[in-house]
Image (spheres, rainbow, N blue to C red):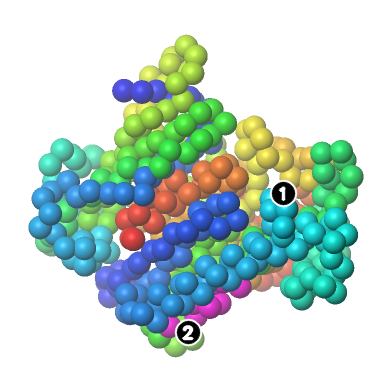
């Protein structure tokens, strides 16, 4: 797995998305029902889909019951940070971000590689943790000129387009 | 949040304005109706209008032409004169911590309304989304955001549509340090990164880069934005001014 610089981590609060997504289940879910599923309180157990195991740290707030939700994977746009390009993929299930994965990170010198061995799993679990507070929108100052704040915000955006 | 509100439809639109991705989210019935799409388009148009007038990144903006002497203030859009008035009041109210005169590369002070334009523009765009029955809207311009709701929606109780705004935790990546819950109002965050952008402190006449961020929330994004900037660069004087002159606003320091 590619690594991410710890300083990128220290300013990266959230994740970057691409402007496209694909359902991880087959195409039987209509857009309308997908949007409805994303807005319902998650059951947590259903709709994990293929290839996207629910993270153990995901929060399952809200009422239980069948939401019929399909997991959706959103790949983030590549954002150029001061440390190089960063790209992350998140999985949204039942309206909650259940997993995040770094697809592309600044691939710089050996120090980046050393630092990154811990950083990626931390980034992944903490990204999910932040979501457990059921955030609707994000406010922050870091890297606004690079559109960085758009990253977690764009994850939320993409989940609702 | 009541289960009924949690189940309300929600829809997002994203477009790039002022060089940054701006998000508009609607919650409530009718988010897919034509009226909603029209209102959202008008909101984005409003943002683009403000960019055309005020951008310091576009050589053809009215502010840049004003700087070069190609236009007088009277020849500019009336919003330019209004911006100067707001900027003057902001400098006074913040005890000088907020300024619209910023140094260019040579150190000369130039008119730069950037510190208030984004919040002002986003707040103005949001007001265009407040007439959709049953709908609450949030416009987020790279971390400065405004929440509006149709006048029939309550602020409290089971029918209230509450937005949970996560404030970035700069010290701990990918976590939100605080949550501000709003049914109406604004949140603005000012700060700098470990490298790069700094904010200008007019009292010390220097660029300020320090860790952390200042978030201000309250009724109007224009003033939340002004105060967040002033508090980030300013010292105790700015905090005292804030405490006495902005009772409707609250700050979060990270």
- What chain is tagged by disc 1? B
- Which residues make up the magenta segment? B122-132
Q: State the image coordinates of residue B63 (x, y, percent, origin top left).
A: 77, 61
Q: Mark 2 packing: few (<14 Cα in 10 Å), some, or many (20+)?
A: some
Residue A84 circle label: none
Numbered badge on residue B131: 2
Nearest the viewer among A24 and A111 is: A24
Of the numbered discs 2 and 1, the one sitting upstream in the chain is 2
Chain letter for mark 2:
B
Identity of the residue furthest to the bottom in this view: B152
Above or below, B72 relative to A142: below
Q: Within the image, what quadrant is residue A51 found in? A: top left
Vertical order, A79 against A34 (above or below): above
- Quadrant of the rendered image containing residue B217: bottom right
- Label 1 belongs to which residue? B232
Quarter of the C terminus of chain B within the rendering: top right
Q: Residue at left 55%, top 62%?
A: B145
Name the mark nearer the viewer: 2 or 1. Answer: 2
Q: What residue appears at the point 17 percent right and 57 percent down from the top-left corner? A: A69
Residue at (43% x, 38% y) in the render: A78
Position of residue B4 measured from the top left corner of the image (x, y, whole percent)? 28, 75
Q: Image point 44% across, 52% down: which residue?
A: A153
CA–CA distance between discs 2 and 1?
34 Å
Is A157 a magenta residue? no
**Quadrant of the rendered structure where residue A63 is?**
bottom left
Circle 1 packing at 10 Å, graded few (<14), some (14-19), many (20+), is: many
Is B206 left, or right, of B161 in this rendering?
right
Percent across and percent down for residue A11 are 53, 36
């Amino acid at each position: 797995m590619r690594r991410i610089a710890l300083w990128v981590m220290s300013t990266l609060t959230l994740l970057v998305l691409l402007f496209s997504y694909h359902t991880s289940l087959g195409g039987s879910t209509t857009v309308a029902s997908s949007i409805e599923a994303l807005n319902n309180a998650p059951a947590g157990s259903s709709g994990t889909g293929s290839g996207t195991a629910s993270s153990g740290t995901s929060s399952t707030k809200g009422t239980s019951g069948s939401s019929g939700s399909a997991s959706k994977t959103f790949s983030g746009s590549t954002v150029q940070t001061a440390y190089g390009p960063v790209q992350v993929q998140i999985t949204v299930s039942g309206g909650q971000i259940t997993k995040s994965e770094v697809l592309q990170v600044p691939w710089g010198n050996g120090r980046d590689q050393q630092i990154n061995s811990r950083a990626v799993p931390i980034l992944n679990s903490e990204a999910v943790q932040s979501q457990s507070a059921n955030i609707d929108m994000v406010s922050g100052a870091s890297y606004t000129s690079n559109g960085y704040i758009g990253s977690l915000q764009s994850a939320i955006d993409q989940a609702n387009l | 949040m009541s289960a009924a509100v949690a189940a309300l439809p929600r829809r997002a639109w994203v477009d790039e304005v002022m060089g940054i991705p701006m998000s508009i989210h609607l919650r409530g019935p009718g988010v897919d109706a034509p009226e909603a799409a029209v209102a959202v388009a008008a909101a984005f148009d409003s943002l683009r209008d403000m960019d055309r007038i005020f951008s310091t990144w576009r050589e053809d903006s009215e502010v840049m032409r004003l700087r070069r002497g190609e236009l007088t203030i009277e020849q500019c859009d009336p919003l330019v004169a209004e911006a100067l008035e707001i900027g003057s009041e902001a400098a006074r109210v913040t005890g000088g911590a907020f300024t619209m005169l910023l140094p260019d590369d040579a150190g000369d002070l130039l008119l730069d309304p950037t510190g208030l334009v984004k919040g002002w523009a986003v707040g103005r765009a949001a007001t265009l989304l407040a007439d959709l029955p049953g709908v609450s809207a949030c416009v987020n311009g790279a971390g400065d955001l405004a929440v509006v709701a149709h006048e029939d929606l309550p602020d409290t109780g089971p029918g209230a549509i509450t937005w949970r705004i996560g404030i970035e935790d700069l010290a701990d990546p990918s976590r939100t340090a605080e949550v501000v819950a709003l049914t109406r109002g604004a949140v603005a965050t000012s700060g700098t990164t470990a490298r790069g952008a700094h904010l200008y402190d007019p009292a010390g006449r220097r660029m300020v880069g320090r860790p952390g961020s200042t978030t201000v929330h309250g009724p109007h994004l224009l003033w939340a934005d002004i105060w967040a900037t002033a508090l980030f660069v300013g010292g105790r004087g700015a905090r005292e001014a804030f405490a006495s002159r902005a009772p409707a606003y609250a700050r979060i320091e990270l």
